[in-house]
């Protein structure tokens, strides 16, 4: 073709010959644009020629099966036109094309500058535009189709404190599962849910601990000791002169200690005792508030567990729907690229036959490359969507999940907006969590304030005790000393008991207790505002999901009509293109509209399902007790919503 070919393959000619318009002679000049990025493109003065004629002249009219006066220009004649400015002929419009020529020159400079912004990559070989580059093998492996169905019994999570090893990180076969199976696995494997189960167990134990305040404490006390001591006795003044009788007279008095008498001795003793001690708070104003606060904290933990069940179901549902969307997007892009290659082959055949210009083939090459980029990105998006679902399900690292359910829209939401709002407020675990937290703060305030009140306690105790004392290495000096109190071996045993009351009343602490109670009261007041904010947030989330659900249903109906019309239009334009009745531009635009319609139908379908799942998240009843089983529910029955 004269307009095709590589480089400047147009030929200047004077239209004064047979078939040219009378009294009109044009010299057509190309403006060649050499460049690495764009190759060599040619701009011609056809706009000036077409502007001179209100309608196409006879010589420019193309008949079926013919390309007009430029039909048979040989490929070998690729000489550029003379570098002269085209002048308007005698019967022309009189317009000077010098301004248009200057615009082309400026465009040449701009394109060269734009091409220079992207430097050539060193070592990159020339690319054949007719051959698309291969898709990375890593993406192909990550997007392998599912070969087996996932067995929930083999989908147990890894150890919470362990790290995967090289063998476990090796990708296994892709395993498919349904949405219901995904929800069941998530409820069983979720690390977040398991952590909340542990929190509920901890608050349960804490409640039992506070309930023990109603009971007395009984303690067993056992003691034992052993030791040795050395003593040195000296009496500077004796007691013989006190006149206490013969027992204090020397030399035979039993208790007589002469002046200057002394003694040295060692004593070894062993003692042991055992008993019971009882304490009981007869009057404690802080006991009831402490127990009530612990019970409220347990309730908050349980409602948090129910709320996390709702959130997890929504997250898994959205991830599953997004995976379905990614699967369908890959299929659409694969079909689009396959169709591009078919049209490209047809364009090249028509080009070789001289029926279409080379521009058509180049355009189809560019469209195919662009659609391949879209396909590659959709493959990456599907690989990421699979991994996101695996993370939510807490699957073993070697398992890659795939969606087994076909993508289809869910039914319309069974409740109207008012019914949905009333049902969302009733028994909402998020609101109940705030109320339980507020109750716990108020009871903690009461317990703190009770520290300013008296506390009466009973105590009682009793036990047995025994000891053994031996004295040895006794040495007397200066007539001796204190012999009546020295016993070489002494054993002693006995028992004791006690009973009493203790009254404790804090009279002054600098306002510390009162201020702590005030702080807890303020926190409870703040939780009331949190309740109001959460109530408004629930309504906003529900109304947003409700309106988007209705919009998605309407968009889906419109998208189905658009797909039907676009498909018929694409079939017609493809036949017209193959017959030479439509241009490649019409074919490209119609194909782009068909792909857009398919994606719009897909997005509308996913939008219906996602908004339904968001509505379900606000109303779905969930158990508060972690010991109860959780049954996945994918829909809401309007008759049982209330």
Image: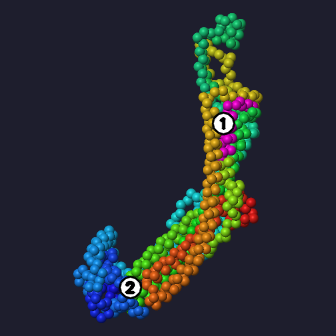
**Pointer 1: residues within 10 angstroms few (<14), some, or many (20+)?**
many
Which image quadrant: the C terminus?
Answer: bottom right
Q: Where residue 267 sits: x, y (%)?
A: 63, 25
Whether residue 35 is visible here, answered yes or no, is yes
Left or right position of 606 against 499 = left
Q: Is residue 279 magenta?
A: no
Q: Secondary structure at mark 2?
A: loop
Name which residue lies at 64% across and 42% down.
525
Left or right position of 612 against 101 = right
Whether residue 31 is visible here, answered yes or no, is no
The kind of secondary structure the magenta stretch mainly shows is: helix
Q: Say which mark, if any, is on residue 448.
A: 1
Q: Which residues are magenta?
A: 437-458
Instruction: Decide: is 622 above or below 153.
Output: above
Outermost residue on the bottom side: it is 18
Which-is-in-front pick, marks 1 and 2? 2
Q: Which residue is mark 2?
A: 55
């Amino acid at each position: 073709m004269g307009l095709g070919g590589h480089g400047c393959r147009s030929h200047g000619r004077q239209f004064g010959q047979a078939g040219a318009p009378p009294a009109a002679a044009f010299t057509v000049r190309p403006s060649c644009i050499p460049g690495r990025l764009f190759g060599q493109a040619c701009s011609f003065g056809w706009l000036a020629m077409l502007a001179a004629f209100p309608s196409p002249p006879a010589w420019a009219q193309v008949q079926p099966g013919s390309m007009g006066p430029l039909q048979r220009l040989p490929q070998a004649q690729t000489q550029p036109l003379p570098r002269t400015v085209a002048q308007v002929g005698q019967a022309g419009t009189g317009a000077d094309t010098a301004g248009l020529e200057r615009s082309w020159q400026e465009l040449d400079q701009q394109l060269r500058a734009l091409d220079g912004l992207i430097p050539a990559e060193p070592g990159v070989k020339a690319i054949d535009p007719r051959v698309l580059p291969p898709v990375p093998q890593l993406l192909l492996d990550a997007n392998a189709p599912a070969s087996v169905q996932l067995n929930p019994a083999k989908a147990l999570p890894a150890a919470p404190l362990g790290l995967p090893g090289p063998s476990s990180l090796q990708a296994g076969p892709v395993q498919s599962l349904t949405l219901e199976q995904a929800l069941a696995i998530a409820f069983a494997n979720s690390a977040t849910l398991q952590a909340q189960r542990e929190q509920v167990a901890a608050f349960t134990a804490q409640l039992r601990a506070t309930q023990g305040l109603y009971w007395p404490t009984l303690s067993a006390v056992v003691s034992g000791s052993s030791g040795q001591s050395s003593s040195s006795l000296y009496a500077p003044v004796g007691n013989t002169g006190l006149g206490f009788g013969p027992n204090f007279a020397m030399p035979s008095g039993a208790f007589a200690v002469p002046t200057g008498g002394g003694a040295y001795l060692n004593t070894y003793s062993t003692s042991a005792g055992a008993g019971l001690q009882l304490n009981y708070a007869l009057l404690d104003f802080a006991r009831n508030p402490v127990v009530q606060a612990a019970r409220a904290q347990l309730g908050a933990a349980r409602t948090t567990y129910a709320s996390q069940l709702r959130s997890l179901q929504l997250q898994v549902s959205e991830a599953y729907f997004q995976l379905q969307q990614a699967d369908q997007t890959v299929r659409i892009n694969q079909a689009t690229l396959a169709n591009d290659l078919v049209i490209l082959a047809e364009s090249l055949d028509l080009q070789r036959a001289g029926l279409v210009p080379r521009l058509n083939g180049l355009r189809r090459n560019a469209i195919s490359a662009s659609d391949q980029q879209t396909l590659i990105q959709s493959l990456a998006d599907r690989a990421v969507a699979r991994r996101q679902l695996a993370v939510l399900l807490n699957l073993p690292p070697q398992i890659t999940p795939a969606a087994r359910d076909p993508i289809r829209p869910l039914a319309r939401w069974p409740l109207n907006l008012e019914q949905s709002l009333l049902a969302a407020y009733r028994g909402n675990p998020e609101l109940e969590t705030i109320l339980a937290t507020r109750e716990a703060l108020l009871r903690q305030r009461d317990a703190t304030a009770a520290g300013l009140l008296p506390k009466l306690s009973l105590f009682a105790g009793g036990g047995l005790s025994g000891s053994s004392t031996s004295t040895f290495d006794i040495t007397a000096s200066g007539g001796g000393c204190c012999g009546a109190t020295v016993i070489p071996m002494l054993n002693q045993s006995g028992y004791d008991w006690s009973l009493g009351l203790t009254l404790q009343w804090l009279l002054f602490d600098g306002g510390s207790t009162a201020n702590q109670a005030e702080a807890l009261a303020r926190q409870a007041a703040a939780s009331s505002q949190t309740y109001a904010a959460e109530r408004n947030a629930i309504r906003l989330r529900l109304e947003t999901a409700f309106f988007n659900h209705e919009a998605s249903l309407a968009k889906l109906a419109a998208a189905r009509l658009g797909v039907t019309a676009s498909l018929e239009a694409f079939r017609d334009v493809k036949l017209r293109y193959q017959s030479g009745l439509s241009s490649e531009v019409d074919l490209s635009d119609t194909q782009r509209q068909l792909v857009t319609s398919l994606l719009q139908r897909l997005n509308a379908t996913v939008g219906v399902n996602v908004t339904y799942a968001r509505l379900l998240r606000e109303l779905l009843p969930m158990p508060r007790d972690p010991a109860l089983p959780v049954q996945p529910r994918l829909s809401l029955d309007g008759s049982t919503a209330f």
